[in-house]
Amino acid sequence: MNISFQHIIPTGFNNQSRVWIYQNNRPFTKPEMLHIEEHLGNRILEWEFQGTSLQSHVSILFQQFIIVMVDQPATQNNSSYAGNLIGLIREIEEDCQVTLSNRQMLAFIIQDRIQLMPLTMVNDAIEKDLITSETLYFNNTVLTKEELLNNWIVPLKDSWLSNRMPENVESDDEFIY
């Protein structure tokens, strides 16, 4: 599976531009992708900060991830944009009959495909060697363009899930009672 996506991300955005990632529970169809890009793109173009229009971008990557980027640093107060975006995402969920806001569903590249797994199943998948420390994971917690480009698709060992890997979990055998 080709995981190159960096060339799709616009270069004219500051590296600290705010990013939101929404993962679908299934691949989008082409008509759905066109609808989403148009619907979201038109709506976020209206966003302003202190009277100035914000540069924005919407992409759908790997037919499964909606990437919204706004050229406003993640450190600035963006709660109104986040609330507005949540409303737009709910509209898309309803229009397309999909689930975009389930943060308990994680995405991995397994056997050259994007596969979703509930967080509650990760430990079991590790024990059964379905995923390893080298399995690529979509870290949808990134907040900036820079993080998106460098830390979105990472080996499991380099993610917040690394503490679940056997080599990072202390064994009871190591303790003296």
Image (cartoon, grey):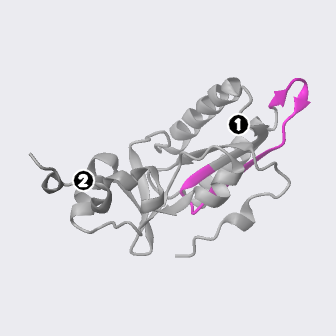
Q: Position of residue 89 (x, y in %)?
A: 58, 37
The one nearer the camera, 164 or 117, is 164
Amino acid at dot 1:
Ala
The answer to whether 7 appears left or right of 20 in the picture is right
Which residue is labeled 2 in the image? 170
| In the image, residue 65 lies in the stretch drawn in magenta | yes
Chain part drawn in magenta? 47-66
Which residue is labeled 1 in the image? 74
* Label 2 element class: loop
* Label 1 element class: loop
Taking the spot 44% from the left edge, 51% from the top edge, the residue there is 25
Residue at far right of view = 52
Q: Position of residue 97 (x, y in %)?
A: 47, 43
Q: Position of residue 94 (x, y in %)?
A: 52, 37
Residue at far left of view = 177
| In the image, residue 142 lies in the stretch drawn in magenta | no
